[in-house]
Image (cartoon, rainbow, N blue to C red):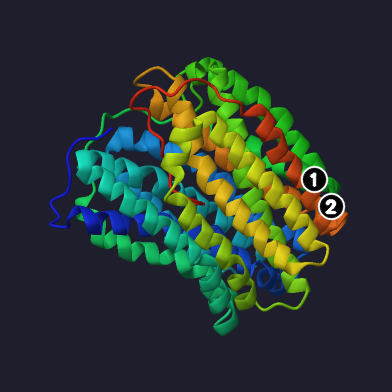
Amino acid sequence: MTTGAGRSTLGPLPVALLLGSLIGLSGMGSAAVAVALPAVVDHFDVPADRGVWVISAYAITLAVGTPLYGRAADNAGIRTPFAVGIVLLSLGALLAAAAPSYPAMIAARLLQGTGAGAAPVLALAALRVLYDGRTRSAALGHLAGTAVAVTALGPVVGGFLTDAVGWRAAVAVPSFALVALAVVWRSLPTGGTGARLDYAGAALVAGTAAGLVLLVQSPSIGTAAAVAGAALLALGAPAVTTWVRRRPAGFLPRSVLAEPAVLRSALGGAALPASWFGLLVAIPTVLAAAGWSPLEIGFALLPGALLGVVVSRRVGRTIDRFGAGRSITLAALTCFVAVLVGALGAAGAPVLLMVAMALVYAGFTLGQPAMSAAVAEVVPEGTEGVALGMATLVFFLGGGLGAAVAGLGSVLGHPWSLVLLSLLPLTAAVVSRAPGRRTPGAPCAGPPGPAA
């Protein structure tokens, strides 16, 4: 992807730990903020169903930004796009924390998500360029463990800061990524091919995705949201199709779209972040309504996050044993059970909400790298990066959709909105049958853990 490296004297271990912390801090953009969400909607006096846009807006721009940063690294090397992304992530977090109004906060979260997409894809790319052999394998292991561990702390950190200082402090936490960036900056690879970026294609995809989320949310937001969502979808879908025909090597490459197994794996995997983001919206809302403090909510989510750390250690073995396609199916079924357990918990059994979060972390942590491996199995050599970028785009767009479905709790009731949400992972389990045999050397790890 790139050539050249920095002149830092940092060794593989500190570089991996710093890059893993950057992925983890981008994960706190959803994990910590979810715990603070009830306080946010109370402060701005907006209905809880509209509060889901704090999560959905972040998820949509994260989804679009992730493959875009991969292309940017081809263009300018890893260092500059990585720095731009972390600065946008941090600036968005600070602006969201200081937001004087709810629309201003949503705008800041859009900016934050735009930057967050850099960390998962470029941290992995940097290690692959800097190291090889056993050094690379060890560095990737340290990066994955650090990323999942930092993300796991998100709910407790968000709950503690919301209780002790206020929700603005919890929202600002990801801005500490600037410190890690400053330390690791000189170690990041430089150099690029000068390839052009398809910003217009990215914007069309983002607008179309926002239309889908608005349409899903319209029963709780109102007629204006339905009209706006339908308009964005009606205009965006044909515009994206036309753009793909005009730019076959653009943001959505035609060669990748023509491969059914890639789309099947991506669509199957998309239900996993849908389940995760959906529970991140629903559980804090339900527990806050029951009188739980933000810190108590954070501790309720902690066991699930810790299970994600444990599962991440066994992901490679599981994928090797069952295959990538069956691993996606297993992850989807796990998330299906998780969301149904969450629905029972929302009906009046808080302990089941903790079980639901633990299950969804396990499913997400397995499913994301399984999707990456499934895609790498079926695409021609040399196109893995483009295919994985598009699959990751579809994957994280599922997060925005899941948050929107969970946000219908104010209309349907939270148990029933979660029952509706459970249809997404159930459908994924049916769709995501094994796309092919594992090819020698095919990667079995993508961005580690819930990096959103």
Residue 451 against residue 28 in the figure, above or below: above
Instruction: Count residues near mark 1 (Cα–Cα under 10 Å), then give few for <14, some for 14-19, many for 20+.
Output: some
Measured from the top left, where is residue 182 in percent x and y? 27, 61
Residue 394 coordinates in the image, percent (x, y): 57, 35
Q: How many labels were placed on the picture? A: 2
Residue 23 in the image: above or below residue 258 = below
Q: Eyeballing the image, is 68 above or below 37?
A: above
Residue at point 40% right, 42% down? 121
- Residue picked out by circle 2: 416
Query: Residue 160, located in which quarter of the rendered image?
Result: bottom right
Find residue 192 and report its image quarter.
Answer: top left
Question: Which residue is nearer to you in this view: 77 or 345?
Answer: 345
| Residue in the image at 56% along x and 65% along y | 303
**Type of the residue with mark 1:** Leu
Q: CA distance from mark 2 to mark 1?
A: 6 Å
Q: Are marks 2 and 1 in contact (CB under 8 Å)?
A: yes
Quadrant of residue 330 in the image? top right
Residue 267's x, y, as percent? 61, 32
Quadrant of the image containing the N terminus: top left
Mark 1 highlights which residue?
420
Residue 113 in sight here: yes
Residue 438 on image: x %, y %: 43, 24
Badge 1 element: helix
Quick one: 399 or 76, which is closer to the camera?
A: 399
Amino acid found under the numbered disc labelled 2: Trp
Q: Report the side of 242 relative to 25 (left or right).
A: right
